Amino acid sequence: MSVEVETRLRRGPLAALRGLLYRPLASYYLLLSSAGLLLVIGLVMVFSATAVQSYAADGNAYASVSRQALFALLGLVAFWFFQRLPARTYRALGTPLLFLSIALLVLLDLVGVLPGARIGPIHGDATNNLWLYLGPVELQPSELAKLALALWGANILVAKGRAIGRWRDLSTPLFPVAGVLFLLVGYNDFGTMVCLLILFAGLLWAAGVRLRVFAGLTVVALAGFALLITLPGFRYRMVRLTSFADSAHCDRQSSCYQGLHGLYAIADGGWFGVGLGEGRLKWGWLPNGHNDFIFAVIADELGVVGCFVVLALLSVLAYTGLRIARRVDDPFRRLVSAGITIWLVGQAAINIGGVVGLLPITGLPLPFISDGGSALIVTLAAVGLLASFARAEPDAARALHARPPDRWVRLLWAPLPPLPRERRAGKRSPGRTQ
């Protein structure tokens, strides 16, 4: 091979892509672009999935998407706020957020004693006690618990240091507190509990915990799953687990009805979809098409191509989060980055797996895309954490310190040049003619 041909191969698209990835702020811009595009896709698809039903309900086709846009705006404020905090503040926030989450989860069971508070709503055969309404404020404590566990768990693991190699030092207080959190969340929301377990396992994996610890935790988790599925009050969970594999005979009252019509929507879409806003199954045939089954609406209207775009953006987000975890120097930042990335990717995998029929339906929303206020705000706050850590990468930090201030900052904050002495004294310049 000649030198000229070899040089051309080295300067091809892959070399250019590799050069872009080696730039100091590559992680930061990859994170912003992937999360931003997913957020825009989510707003578009929420409007497409809810416009007709919102118009039929109150004559305003923009009611649901306007509400989602407001939550997106609040989420962007949370993103900016968390992006600007220093690492020591993140470590200090972990414990208050964790106890606040536990207190709100306890209130879900004690909601009757609070004036103006209620839970709900109730759907089908499952009491969906996931939301807490305190007057006009709507909260989903289990979403806040995800971010709290990531911060608190990473702080505990970093503080223990090499002691995590000993079972007794690792287990206290990490396992008892996390177990209480899992039980409080799993009592009302089995899917979110699974997501919390994935996040917790991601923290332990990033910290380098031994495999035998994972084996013991797997046995305990399976026993807890069996208990939360077979209890008399949770019969609907067993029905969901057994019915998702057998959807041959479904009616509107069956647990497999939603999954079956999700597959119908995917089949109708084909390669390129029926067109944005042209889907029909979302008009009452596909339950929760705007929320946990919005991926089926994407497949119906945008086809395989639209699904591939969403999966590609989620893959970029996963790569970027793990890249940040690998490149930062601070162990706390490394653990939080890995935990948040595994949480978001794991939740997306569970949601998409339920839609395509590979996993049981758990009701978890698709990050950035599904309709929901608490989930979107907490997710964007978590992305703000990742953005802050991306700016703390060694190369990125040096580039930011060496970068001159932006032009508008110089215009606003640079001191004005002093006036000539003659002009300040009210005199003419001696060199100027009359």
Image (spheres, rainbow, N blue to C red):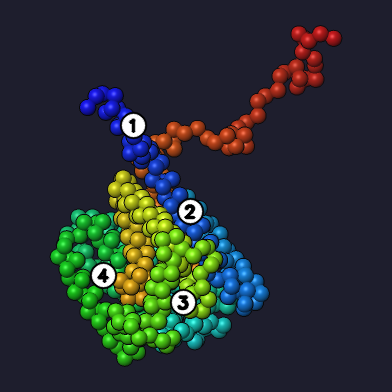
Q: Residue furthest right?
A: 434
Q: Percent x, y for residue 37? A: 47, 54
Instruction: State the residue at coordinates (54%, 36%).
Output: 406
**Badge 3 local density, few (<14 within 10 Å), some, or many (20+)?**
many
Question: Residue 413's x, y, as percent?
Answer: 60, 36
The picture places residue 57, in percent across and down from the top left corner, at 62, 78
Q: CA distance from mark 2 to mark 1?
A: 30 Å
Instruction: From the image, tell me which residue sits under label 3.
Output: 286
Q: Earlier in the sequence, mark 2 or mark 1?
A: 1
Tell me if label 4 and label 1 are in contact, CB under 8 Å. Answer: no
The amino acid marked with disc number 2 is Gly
Tag 4 residue: 175
Residue designated by label 1 = 11
Q: Indicate which disc, 2 or 4, sits on the residue closer to the N terminus.
A: 2
Q: Are marks 2 and 4 in contact (CB under 8 Å)?
A: no
Instruction: Pick the residue in front: 227 or 29.
Output: 29
